[in-house]
Amino acid sequence: MSVSLHHLRAGDTSRWAVLQDGAWSELDHGLADLLARPLDQARAVVEAARPVGPPRPGEQVLPPIDRQEVWAAGVTYLRSRDGRKEESAGHGSLYDHVYDSDRPELFFKASPWRVVGEGEAVGIRADSGWDVPEAEVGLVLNAAGEIFGYTLGNDMSSRSIEGDNPLYLPQAKIYDRSCALGPAIVPSWAVEPGPFPIGLRVLREGREAYAGTTSTSAMARSFADLAGWLFRALSFPEGVVLLTGTGVVPDADFTTQPGDVVEITSAPLGTLTNPVVAVGEGKGKP
């Protein structure tokens, strides 16, 4: 059974649609309403969606969220730990500690209005000279912390900024167009709970400038563990998306450039494609 939830917009009107085994249905509820419900009730709503035709001509694919914050986990793969140590200016032991500790690194990534979807441009900061995409599986969690579904995410990161000082992480991670999600949500009842293969490609002038693969089987932490820590002292009455970290980190001689195209793929979850643009002002005082 193939099932996915899509957020679509025509003009000023948006809607949630379900694609199941090639047939389209429309939901009478938004994602926030679904994630406020227990998982079994949300599933019943999805399965009762009204049959409709395919997406209308000109309908835009939106990020698969509506009112959810996006959070992210860091240093959940050995390659991520090594990459963060590589970029760090003398603070490498911090990443050894967080990789091995019980408490994970969790950070706020994006408000919903800052998230871009399939085909929209992701950003690299104009005041950073070393920038990479981070290909990740996103957990779509309901208000109870249950996994409602999965999506693909791109946690764009300024390695030069965090490398200067770990306290600059919010500036390296949180800025306009720094987060992409999509193309859809695959409900947890319609897919095996992992491991998920993840592929990352960066295309430059139509040619492959970088490619790498990983699997969530290489994670040092489980999805349930990360979700449990996020909900320890935070509530999300309309649900939340939690990016689970990246195991694909380009070498130090690679940086993303405006005009590149980032492609993230996982067979069970689809493909998320975004062109790259520069965001903000250049180096120097604003």
Image: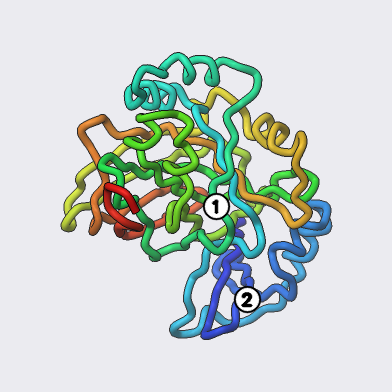
Query: The C terminus is located in which quarter?
Result: bottom left
Quick one: SS at disc 1? Answer: strand
Identify the mark at residue 15; answer none if there is no mark: 2
Q: Is residue 87 visible?
A: yes
Give, as a three-letter code, the residue at label 1.
Ala
Nearest to the observer: residue 197 or residue 58: 58
Q: Residue at x 52, y 79 (%)?
A: 55
The total number of labels drawn is: 2
Between discs 1 and 2, the one toward the N terminus: 2
The residue drawn where x is 56% and y is 84% is 12
Q: Is residue 228 above or below residue 177?
A: above
In the depicted view, which residue is nearer to us: 118 or 188? Answer: 118
Residue at (77% x, 70% y) in the render: 48
Q: Tell me where residue 15 sits by quadrant.
A: bottom right
Three-letter amino acid code of the residue under disc 2? Arg
Q: Secondary structure at mark 2?
A: strand
